[in-house]
Image (tube, grey):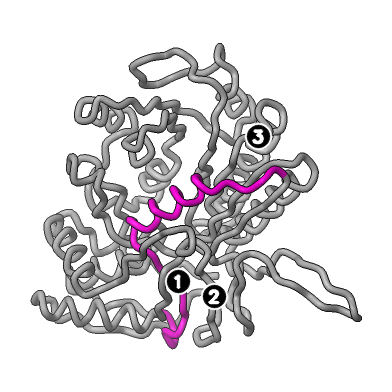
Amino acid sequence: MRFSRLGYEVTAVDNYFRRDACRELDAEMLYPVLSLEERARIWHEKTGKEIKVVIGDLSDPEVMRSLFQPDAIDYKWCVDESYTGLPDVIIHYAEQPSAPYSLMDYKHADITLSNNLRVTNNLLFAVRDFCRGVHIVKLGTMGEYGTPNIDIEEGWIEIEHKGRRDTFLYPRQASSIYHTSKIMDTDLMWFGVRMWGLRVTDLMQGPVYGLETEEIRIDPRFKTIFNYDEIFGTLINRFITQAVVGHPLTVYGAGGQTRGYLDIRDTLQCVLAAVENPPEPGELTIYNQIMETFSVNEIAEIVHRVGCQRGHPVSIQQLENPRCEAESHYYNPTYQGLVELGVKPHYLTDESVHSLFELVEGYRDNIREEIIFRGIKW
């Protein structure tokens, strides 16, 4: 919607993986979200702009390749079926996004690896074969880096070894199968850049919070997915939902786990900045897409403070950590690249947390407390 509003011709491709997974795992969302076709139809009614919709599984190489061939595209919804030509930019979000999901058992680990790596590989070969000049913007994750005891640079690190110097991808050490698949994605993209001269921007994103965007203000039916369960719910969403229903805030272990966060408005700013500043052919540009860092304890304290102000005197409960991760560690990532491109950060404030509380309180009757915490271990 953001790119369409700015005048881009947009085609969105999805296979409803996350919605289907939520049903399979009985992990309901806070509120129902309309189908992609319905949202595109409403967008056209409200703005006069078209977002073409294709429903298909991009882990199938033929489905991926069909998107680059005018006679093969099967639009699920559009106003004008005429082929608009090969793309200028491809934004790759088509991956299973949950670390807990990837480690539920061997089957879900297999789904994660099969989907994420096949989609990325299929995309690379389609771009190589049909439009090598296209700019690929891929969603990475800060989780690729792990928690090293040195500063985290933006994707690359210069090494001096035995009197010689070179620049390498920053060493990465993921703590889940999902994050490991994202490392492999970066390696696949780097292969395509080196071998075929592709142009790729890899955005190492942290957890996103918030719902308020200019597009959602056009019509409340454009609200994004809001999960609050242990599998797909992000930390801030989970804690606020727990506070609203009186469930203790579940802090894993010592609570010193520190990560980078960003507002959904900054996600849109960052992706737009990446699109408008493409790399040269044969170049892989990497940005750390976060705006500030917090520990789990710091997030819990913010939610506790705001919750109490709103009449939710929830407690904070430290649980035995079900995950294999450092609970207290050094964490100092660099994340200036996107700001230097003009991104103006929004920071996590009590006011922004109040707005999320207000949203969740409005759907209080939809919350199922039993799905918030299941104790998935690895």
Q: Which residue is at 84% across, 73% downward?
A: 165
The residue pinned by badge 1 equals 260
Q: Position of residue 373 (x, y in %)?
A: 35, 67
Left or right for 178, reference 207: right
If you read the primary sequence from the N terminus, does the residue marked by circle 1 or circle 2 appear first?
Answer: 1
Q: CA distance from mark 3 to mark 1?
A: 32 Å
User: Contact (CB < 8 A) between labels 1 and 2?
Assistant: yes
Q: Secondary structure at mark 1?
A: strand
Query: Which amino acid type corresponds to the residue marked 2 in the rendered image?
Result: Pro
If you read the primary sequence from the N terminus, does the residue marked by circle 3 or circle 1 appear first?
Answer: 3
Closest to the observer, 334 or 374:
334
- The label nearer to you, 1 versus 2, is 2
The span picked out in magenta is 252-281
Closest to the observer, 6 or 227:
6
Query: Which amino acid type corresponds to the residue marked 1 in the rendered image?
Result: Gly
Residue 261 on the magenta segment: yes
The residue pinned by badge 3 equals 133
